Structure formats: structure tokens, C-alpha cells
């Protein structure tokens, strides 16, 4: 299929799970209405082929934005339109715990493919117990993994070369984000929206801003004092999220620069 490039960019939300992406989707829906498209699939491992994304963009005249968990290839142009990639990152431990509490809160309503990667009767377990089960078996972590692996489109590996592999992967993930139009922080969600709105306005898109946080699982979190190096499960959590710390530090530094640039204008 041949596409001719035009001047209307398309916003692509690379939705890293448990980062307030659902809240961002709500803003996009309210801002663009039917011109916002959400591509979510029952198979949590599914990766959307870039050719299929091209076809979807070409087939939906006037689409302004697309959100998905399944975009792992970041082409600069889609169906002849410049792609503006955006994403949110979250403090790694908080994101991990949010994932565990989401399982606890929504276990009975999860689809079968999702529940297969969760401990049985997860709604009756503590977040610590769910974390211990997942860390021991992979389980749910194979679906969401680390943000670094998610963005780099890679799978976790094991063995003697894990540290070298993850160091190179972190560098690759940073280079991926270097090409993104905007990278926000969950913890500074509304500040980020204002920066994003200002930048999108220069490209002909208008975001409707208002306080908005949805799909939270904080009420299912419970006491998290066990997340410390002295606790065996807590140490496993800290070890598991370590690969994401460099990427999160990068995102924080980038966000601070963009916020300062916005204030200087």
C-alpha cells in the first residue's frame, strides 16, 4: 500500500500499563471524540504489526489519536502522517504495587487469558502474597514486565548475562524515548498535561484539560511496609524493578527540562 505524506500529524499514546494511561485516554476521548481510537486486545502478549497500524490509520479518516498497550514499533510516519508518540512513566516500585493491587481488586472480572497469569483466588490474597506468587512464577509479570522491556519490545532473559543485557536494553529504551514527542510522569500527571497541551497546540491539536484520574486500585493496596530489603519478598520486588530505575531517572530529568522550557516561553 502506498501512502502520500500530508501535514496532519497523528498522536500515538504508547500506553505503558499502570501509569495513569486510562486517565490520559479519558482526556483524549473528551478532546477528540470519535477521532480518538483505542486498540486494546484480549491477548496481553499481542504486538500490533506496524503494517496493521498503517492500515488502521489509513482506514479511519480524520483520526487524531490512537491509544494501545500493543504498539512496540515506533515508525516516524504512519499512512503518510507524522506520528507524535507520547507515553507516561511511573516510579518503578509504585507501578509494580499498582499492578499487584489491580489484580487483587479486579481478579474476578479479568478475562481468562489475564487470569491464567495470576494466582488463584487473587482477590482473597494480600498484595504481598500476589507479588510473591508472580515473582516466583513469572505470571502476570510476563504480561506487563518492566517499563524498560515494554518500551524496548523485548522479553526478560535469565542467566549469566542478564546484567549486561539489561544495561544495553535500558540504553535502547532511552533512545526509544528520545524519539517520542512527549514523556510524562504519573506523579506529575496534570502538570504534564499542561505541557503536552501547549506542545500539541503547535501541531493543530487541542486538549480539553480538567482534573482526571481513573482506574485506580489504591484502595486494594493495603500496607506496603514490607517493601524493603530486609523482607524476602520486598527484596525481590526491589531487585525486579531495578532495571527500570535508570529509565525513570531519565524521564524525570527530561520532564524537568520540558517543564522549564514551557515556563520560559
Image (cartoon, grey):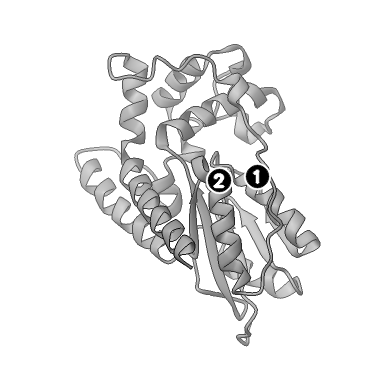
Element type at mark 2:
helix
216 up-or-down from 168: above or below: above
The numbered mark at residue 23 is 1
Looking at the image, can residue 152 be seen?
A: no
Q: Residue at x 80, y 61 (%)?
A: 34
N-terminal-most mark, 2 or 1: 1
Residue nearest the observer in this picture, 76 or 198:
198
Outermost residue on the front side: it is: 264
The numbered mark at residue 62 is none
Expressed as whole percent of the image width and height from the top left, the position of residue 249 reads 34, 46
Element type at mark 1:
helix
Expressed as whole percent of the image width and height from the top left, the position of residue 159 reads 24, 38
Q: Residue at x 49, y 52 (%)?
A: 184
Expressed as whole percent of the image width and height from the top left, the position of residue 156 reads 36, 42
Q: In the picture provided, is 241 more to the left or to the right than 127?
A: left
Expressed as whole percent of the image width and height from the top left, the position of residue 245 reads 33, 41
Closer to the eye: label 2 or 1: 2
34 up-or-down from 57: above or below: above
Which residue carries the number 2 mark?
Answer: 189
Looking at the image, can residue 239 be seen?
A: yes
Q: In the picture provided, is 17 more to the left or to the right than 151?
A: right
Q: Residue at x 65, y 61 (%)?
A: 66
Image quadrant assignment for residue 23: top right
Dot 2 crowding, Cα within 10 Å, few <14, some 14–19, many 20+:
many
**CA distance separating discs 2 and 1:** 9 Å
Dot 1 crowding, Cα within 10 Å, few <14, some 14–19, many 20+:
some
Residue nearest the observer in this picture, 262 or 82:
262
Q: Quadrant of the N terminus?
A: bottom right
Residue nearest the observer in this picture, 196 or 20:
196
Q: Residue at x 58, y 65 (%)?
A: 198
Q: Mark 2 near mark 1, Cβ–Cβ under 8 Å?
A: yes
Amino acid at each position: 500500500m502506498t501512502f502520500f505524506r500530508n501535514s496532519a500529524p497523528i498522536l500515538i499514546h504508547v500506553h505503558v500499563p499502570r501509569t495513569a494511561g486510562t486517565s490520559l485516554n479519558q482526556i483524549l476521548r473528551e478532546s477528540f471524540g470519535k477521532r480518538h481510537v483505542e486498540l486494546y486486545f484480549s491477548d496481553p502478549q499481542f504486538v500490533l504489526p506496524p503494517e496493521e497500524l498503517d492500515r488502521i490509520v489509513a482506514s479511519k479518516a480524520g483520526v487524531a489519536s490512537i491509544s494501545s498497550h500493543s504498539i512496540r514499533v515506533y515508525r516516524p510516519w504512519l499512512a503518510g502522517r507524522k506520528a507524535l508518540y507520547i507515553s507516561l512513566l511511573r516510579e518503578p516500585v509504585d507501578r509494580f504495587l499498582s499492578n499487584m493491587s489491580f489484580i487483587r481488586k479486579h481478579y474476578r472480572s479479568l478475562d481468562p487469558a489475564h487470569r491464567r497469569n495470576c494466582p488463584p483466588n487473587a482477590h482473597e490474597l494480600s498484595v504481598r502474597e500476589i507479588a510473591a506468587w508472580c515473582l516466583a512464577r513469572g505470571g502476570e509479570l510476563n504480561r506487563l514486565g518492566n517499563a524498560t522491556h515494554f518500551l524496548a519490545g523485548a522479553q526478560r532473559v535469565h542467566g549469566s548475562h542478564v546484567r549486561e543485557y539489561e544495561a544495553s536494553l535500558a540504553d535502547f529504551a532511552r533512545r526509544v524515548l528520545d524519539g517520542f514527542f512527549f514523556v510524562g510522569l504519573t506523579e506529575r500527571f496534570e502538570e504534564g498535561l499542561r505541557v503536552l497541551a501547549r506542545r500539541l497546540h503547535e501541531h493543530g491539536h487541542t486538549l480539553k484539560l480538567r482534573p482526571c484520574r481513573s482506574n485506580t486500585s489504591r484502595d486494594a493496596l493495603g500496607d506496603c511496609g514490607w517493601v524493603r530489603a530486609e523482607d524476602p519478598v520486598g527484596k525481590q520486588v526491589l531487585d525486579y524493578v531495578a532495571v527500570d530505575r535508570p529509565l525513570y531517572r531519565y524521564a524525570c530529568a527530561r520532564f524537568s527540562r520540558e517543564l522549564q522550557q514551557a515556563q520560559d516561553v
